[in-house]
Image (spheres, rainbow, N blue to C red):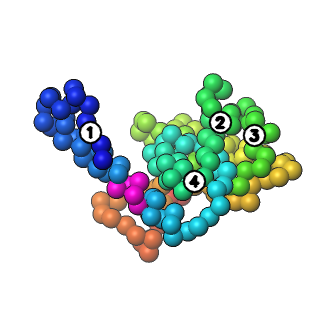
């Protein structure tokens, strides 16, 4: 059970209801995550995750932590906690990658502008360079992770005006072809 801060209790009802809905959603997510933990009894793992602050990465990080795992973010800023890497320069804190149980790579440049040739090249280069750096690093480790998962694209079906399932055909255009 939780209680809203005093300043939210006396303010706009819409803001109050929005916060209550958000807290209820988070509670349902956490309870679901914890119920999954009961079904799959796994020993705690050390898991590194790139793009752990993105939409998918942040949800995955919360889920993994709820399962009792230690999540080590792979970061691009030297001042952030985690494993620093710079795919453009080909550098990574390799020693921090030793003794990981798994490495999940969700990274790659996500465009905020309309796709043009320069943006498409930037997307390809960022995903290829970051994945190559991580794979090369894993191959050099004395104690590499047992699992490497790479998922860096959500455009397999292209632009759709309908819901799709895994049985639908691949779309056309840049994202599906990439």
Query: Where does label 1 land, which residue?
Result: 3
Q: Nearer the viewer, mark 2 or mark 1?
A: 1
6 over 141 or under it: above or below: above
The residues colored magenta run 28-32
Question: Does residue 31 appear to the left or right of 78 in the view shown?
Answer: left
Q: Which is more foreground, mark 4 or mark 2?
A: 4
Q: Main secondary structure of the magenta part?
A: helix
Q: Earlier in the sequence, mark 4 or mark 3?
A: 4
Quote the CA–CA distance across marks 3 and 2.
8 Å
Q: Which residue is mark 2?
A: 82
Horizontal side of 23 relative to 32 (left or right) equals left
From the top left corner, tell me how far across and down residue 143 is, in percent.
83, 52
**Residue in the image at 13% along x and 36% along y:** 13
Q: Nearer the viewer, residue 156 or 47?
A: 47
Q: Residue furthest bottom?
A: 167
Kindly identify which numbered label has been placed on residue 68: 4
**Residue 136 picture location, percent across and down:** 79, 48
Q: Which residue is mark 3?
A: 96
Could you tell which of marks 1 and 4 lies nearer the N-terminus? 1
**Rounded to the nearest whole Å, what is the CA distance between mark 4 and mark 2?**
18 Å
Instruction: Determine which quarter of the picture holds residue 6.
Output: top left
User: Where 58 falls versus 76 (above or below)?
Assistant: below
Going from the N terminus, do you reach mark 3 or mark 2 first?
A: 2
Residue 174 position (above or below residue 130):
below
- Indicate the secondary structure of the residue bearing disc 1: loop
Instruction: Estimate the spatial distance between the alpha carbons at disc 1 and disc 4, rounded to whole Å.
Output: 26 Å
Q: Given this view, does label 1 or label 4 mark the residue nearer the observer?
A: 1
Q: Residue at x 77, y 50 (%)?
A: 99
Query: Closest to the observer: 142 or 30?
Result: 30
């Amino acid at each position: 059970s939780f209680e809203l801060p005093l300043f939210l209790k006396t303010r706009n009802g819409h803001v109050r209801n929005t916060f209550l809905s958000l807290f209820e959603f988070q509670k349902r997510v956490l309870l679901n995550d914890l119920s999954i933990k009961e079904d799959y009894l796994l020993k705690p793992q050390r898991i590194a995750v790139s793009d752990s602050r993105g939409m998918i990465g942040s949800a995955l990080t919360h889920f993994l932590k709820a399962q009792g795992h230690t999540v080590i973010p792979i970061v691009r800023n030297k001042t952030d906690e985690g494993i620093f890497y710079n795919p453009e320069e080909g550098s990574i804190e390799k020693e921090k990658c030793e003794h990981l149980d798994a490495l999940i790579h969700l990274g790659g440049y996500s465009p905020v502008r309309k796709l043009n040739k320069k943006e498409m090249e930037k997307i390809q280069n960022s995903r290829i360079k970051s994945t190559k750096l991580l794979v090369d690093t894993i191959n050099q480790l004395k104690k590499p992770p047992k699992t490497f998962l790479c998922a860096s694209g959500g455009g397999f079906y292209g632009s759709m005006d309908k819901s799709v399932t895994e049985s639908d055909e691949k779309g056309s255009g840049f994202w599906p072809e990439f």
